[in-house]
Image (cartoon, helix red, strand yellow):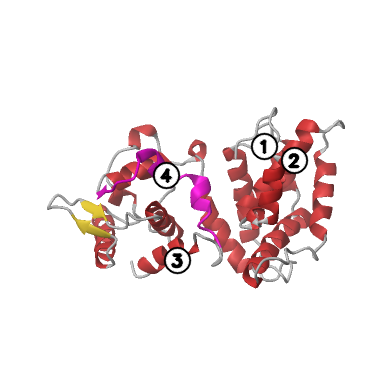
Amino acid sequence: MNLHSNFRYPFFKYLLEEFSGVFHESDFTSLNRLLILYHNHFSFSVNPNNVTDFLDSYERGYSDREQFYWWFGKSKRHRIRQVKYRTAFILRHNRAIFERLLSRKDYASPEATYEALVQISDWVHNLGSKEETDSLIDLDSWKGELASLQHAITPVGVLKNVTRSQMTGHFYEHFAGTDVSTKRDKFSRLKDILVEHQWIVPVDASDTYRYFKQSKGGRLYIAALYYALLEKGHIEKTLDAPHVATLFNSWLVHDFEQSSFVKAFQAEELAQFNCTEKHVRYKYIEEARLLILNL
């Protein structure tokens, strides 16, 4: 999301995303909803800006638990409830996170959003079973999703231990492992799995492979695989989209246009794999998770 002081988020676009449930797919999209409404309020209100008053109003909008998108199926309504309960819980018990975010001059930047999610994640992970939590919130699921989101949306500006001079090397170097041999073995097992399930086929003896799932949605399968590897801790650190695409290109031959291939690994694209079974991307991430189950 990229908000500017002279730009107002389109009203009909907001309504479409609100009533389609897009804003309540994850903690990330819910945070974007907060930022969009605050940005419009901050940029176009005739009254002096007041973060406290805005959050008071925002919390009141979450207090009505009757409006839960009755036109959706049961599974999606449950997902929307969970995300809304989480946001309401933060507003009640740790509003300071949102106050610090909205008080920043760069409140809508990727770095600001990421730091807010890290603060939420740290706080939620310190909540134990004896804490005063909302009984309607699945705390274990929330903790897991926040951990996955941090991997998926880390902006380039806050990446740790990754510099432009390090944007070379082979894919296996980024696998988790105590030594190079362990990393090579894990990467080799991954390729064997992909060959076995007909995702890739060897090209020649140069350790190059042709991507076999070139049909519609082919890029999403690769992006889902990368997300699943991150999610399960098989890859050590989050990398930016061009770096990920370059690493895949070092051993995988495909027919995708490079800019669209890079886009598949962008933070906002990867975050969409954190979804329920009704989401269009669920089939991709579910297949990828099953694929690396015994990696």
- Give the residue pinned by disc 4: 239
In percent of width and height, residue 90 lies at 73, 55
Which residue occupies 52% across, 57% down? 148
Q: CA distance from mark 4 to mark 2?
A: 30 Å
Q: Amino acid at mark 4?
A: Leu
Considering only order in the chain, which callout, 3 or 2, is on the residue closer to the N terminus? 2
CA–CA distance between discs 2 and 3? 35 Å
Q: Label 1 belongs to which residue?
A: 107
Q: Is residue 43 above or below residue 135?
A: above
- Tell me the CA gap for discs 4 and 1: 23 Å
Circle 4 or circle 3, nearest the eye: 3
Q: Are marks 2 and 1 in contact (CB under 8 Å)?
A: yes
Residue 151, visible in the rendered structure:
no
Dot 1 falls on a residue whose secondary structure is: loop
Residue 177 vs residue 244, the one in the foreground:
244
Q: Disc 3 marks which amino acid?
A: Glu
Looking at the picture, how far across and down is residue 186, in whole percent?
A: 28, 60
Residue type of the residue flagged with mark 1: Tyr
**Among the 4 quarters of the image, the one containing residue 3:** top right
Residue shown at 44%/55% (left/top)? 227
Say which label, 2 or 1, has the lower sequence index.
2
Q: Which residues are magenta?
A: 252-275
Q: Which mark is residue 286?
A: 3
At which x and y percent is residue 67?
A: 78, 63
Q: CA distance from mark 3 to mark 1?
A: 34 Å
Quarter occupied by residue 45: top right
Residue 267 is inside the magenta segment: yes
41 relative position to 201: left or right? right
- Residue 64 visible within the image: yes
